[in-house]
Image: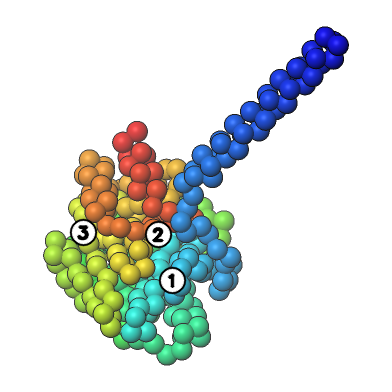
Amino acid sequence: MRRSVWVVWVAVVLLGMLLAGSLAAQAAAPTLAATPTPSASPQPRIELDDELWLRPVADGVFIVTHAFPWAANSLIVEMADDTIVLVDTPYTAEATAQVIAWITAEFGKREIVAINTGFHVDNLGGNAYLAEQGIPIYGSDLTVQMLDERGEQSRALTLEWLQAPADKRYYDGHRDVLFIAPTEVFAAEDGLELDFGGERLQVYYPGPTHAPDNMVVFFPEHRLMFGGCMIIGGDKLGNTADADLEAWPDSVRKLARFEFDILVPGHGDRFDPELLDHTLDLLTS
């Protein structure tokens, strides 16, 4: 009899241990599920060609990536009055023409407004096509100044990196880009607000970062921030030839005043707001 009781007691103990382990595992699951995940993960591509594609990240919001040869991001946003806002351009006029053609095919004939967030070729390399089409291009006085003072110096550095290109098209393409300044110029320190049928966007200058003139563009209704090249989407800072490494972290911290769920870097496939801290970690480590 005692042996039977002992066996039952052991079975109860073992069952209790198994149940405790199971409950503990279940209690741990919410912690794993609560691990921050990107609010805007990459979506299936809309291929325009092998080097140019778009990804939808929200209703009426598309990230454009042009790999020529380095993948760089620009942004398409449909506003409340049906205007299309293009933030930055692909590297070349030809690729920018493809994007504008896609916008027309996707949305029909629309008013288009462009914004340049800096003077580098991945911000405004397609301006020649936009200007030719009569599309207004907003940019700061600082971008106009930097393009005039350092545009060719920046091109020379790019061509130096492409001295032994796998595809000569990249070298020739960057050599032949026409640097066209923004057509609608505002003071960087004042920033810019534009209204589209009651929906606003804000162009804001936090201070020197990746380049002296880098701006950000905030879309409050979409909870969307285009951080451009001041926000790092990869694990390295990349080109710092025009960077102010001392001022950059403080400038990035100023973006914390905005509330956004999507943060678009100039390069990379991450679009989550945690990129703000990621950028600061890279700058201060």
Q: Quadrant of residue 110?
A: bottom left
Vertically, is 254 above or below 201?
above
Residue placed under numbered mark 3 in the picture:
205
Residue 61's label in the rendered image is: 1
- Bin the neighbour count of mark 1 within 10 Å (Cα to Cα): few under 14, some 14-19, many 20 and up: some
Q: Which numbered disc flags the more N-terminal residue, 3 or 2?
A: 3
Q: Give how far across and how far down residue 5 sits, in percent.
A: 80, 14
Q: Residues within 10 Å of mark 3 (few under 14, many from 20)?
A: many
Q: CA distance from mark 3 to mark 2?
A: 19 Å
Label of residue 262 in the image: 2
Is the Cβ of the residue at disc 3 closer than 8 Å to that at disc 2?
A: no
Viewer-side residue, 11 vs 207: 11
Residue 272 visible in rendering: yes
Label 2, residues with CA under 10 Å away: few <14, some 14-19, many ≥20: many
Quadrant location of the C terminus in the rendered image: top left
Contact? badges 2 and 1 (CB < 8 Å):
yes
Residue 137 in sight here? no
Mark 1, mark 3: which one is toward the viewer? 1
Amino acid type, label 2: Ile
At 46% from the left edge and 56% from the top edge, which residue is drawn?
A: 39
Residue 200 location in percent, x, y? 26, 73
